[in-house]
Image (tube, coloured by chain):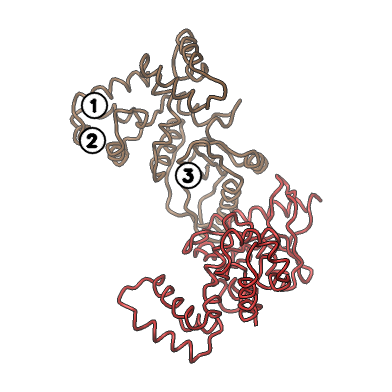
Chain colours: A brown, B red
Amino acid sequence: MRKTCLRAGANSKFAKEVAEKVSSYIYDGIPTREILRLTLRILEKERPVVALRYDLKKAILDLGPSGFGFEEFIARILSEYGYKTKMPPPLEGACISHEVDIVAEKDGRRYMIECKYRNEPGVYIGIKDVLYTWARFLDLCEGFKLKRCLRLDHPWFICNTKFSRDAIQFACCKRVKLTGWRYPQGRGVSLEKLIERKGIYPITVLKEIDKGVRQKLIKANIILCRDLLKKNIKELKKITGMDTQKLKVCKSLITQIIE
Amino acid sequence: MRKTCLRAGANSKFAKEVAEKVSSYIYDGIPTREILRLTLRILEKERPVVALRYDLKKAILDLGPSGFGFEEFIARILSEYGYKTKMPPPLEGACISHEVDIVAEKDGRRYMIECKYRNEPGVYIGIKDVLYTWARFLDLCEGFKLKRCLRLDHPWFICNTKFSRDAIQFACCKRVKLTGWRYPQGRGVSLEKLIERKGIYPITVLKEIDKGVRQKLIKANIILCRDLLKKNIKELKKITGMDTQKLKVCKSLITQIIE
């Protein structure tokens, strides 16, 4: 928990303080969820900006429900890392045409990206998802040989949850790139690190913005906190219907989150 | 509807009568579900055995909920058609080991069978299921080349619902055998035809047997109506806890259904 606080931007003294406070509430067999809730409550009171970052996982879950927001969000993250991305029309494989979520290019390599957004926390991506992604990639490679679609170099599966062990094993074996929550560890870059390293926070971290307004923002292609900063208060009032004071609070919070 | 009645064993005169009776209740925009319900009500009153066969789809839906009963049921159907079937331990592919539902052999060909049981009516099997089945088959073929598992000749996907158009197109292209509800039509044999042609009715066609008893029967490997016939009343009383009279009614109904 201390590590997560640190990553969320708390200094080490404050992280220790929070950890101590939370410990005093902990009892044998306390659910992780409950620890998270306690930590958040303390953070919210004392350092609201750290709290917002701490709750990133929830914020990503809130991107749904249709999963539309998630694909858009992933495309934005990738472009921040220098990928040229597009959401292509169906691509012709050897057998059928496939709906590919994102095609991303960088350094001369082209990735076929399958995005999976899961609404419930704690769910694992199983082997079947990785198997079908690989099969789709193979059919599209055959489609390329038949000159029906563009060349694709790697399949890439990106999701907001973890992967099962056999999914990881299969993906390593067939070189399907996987990115998910806390995966890959070590040398690779997991989803939350991709976000945190460049401060690409989705607007859903802001609790001031309720569900209805959130949908309006996503529709207006305002998915990241930094997109919101680019608009002036007048424009935002028009899109969201929120009042000036609240919008000012949002903007100030964002400046602190991103910095 | 007349065709379904005929297939369920009604003679053509009776089928016509039922059709006429149902027509008199029909109004513009009546849901298919409602027509089915009306037909069933008439059949139940006048020819209970025809009604039981008519309601086969529902009976298969009732095989669940875990899908355990469905796999067992499919294995039984296949063995009635001369396949040697087994539910194997995990098979080693080139990358990972795979849980294969059924391996079936006939005329020197070996099939890797994926069973999918869907609980809700009207659901379609989409492209992803066929894609992952094909990918699994490919990995197992590579596993065979590495001498890790037995040779498999064809992937085969069997389910209790229909298939989406692209799932069918992909399966035809990659020669994944598909069997489902009303599929294949024409030269192929669909699931309900496999059942009807040999009278392999699941015990769930009997409304006299409630859910609790059904689970007990499936556990005792009594999945088909004909399995029930093989046991004497004393044995069945022990397994099901049902009384003699009710069991006799079941046996008599089954004799009429199967003949």
Q: Position of residue A170 (x, y in %)?
A: 66, 43
Callout 3: 10 Å neighbours few (<14), some, many (20+)? many
Q: Are marks 3 and 1 on the same chain?
A: yes
Judge by depth and name the residue closer to the eye, B108 or A44.
A44
Work out how far the residue at label 1 is from the one at label 2, CA to CA, in angstroms: 9 Å
Q: Looking at the picture, how far across and down is residue A174, in whole percent?
A: 65, 44
- Label 3 sits on what residue type? Val
Q: Which residue is mark 3?
A: A103
- Give above or below for B164 relative to A74: below
Tell me which residue sits at (57%, 21%) in the image. A28
> Mark 1 highlights which residue?
A247
The kind of residue on which mark 2 rests is Thr
Looking at the rendered structure, the secondary structure element under dot 1 is helix
Q: Which mark is residue A240?
A: 2
Q: Are marks 1 and 2 in contact (CB under 8 Å)?
A: yes
Mark in front: 3 vs 2? 2
Decide which of A45, B243 is in the foreground and name it: B243
In this rendering, position of residue B219 left or right of residue A145? right
Question: Is A42 placed above or below B146 here?
Answer: above
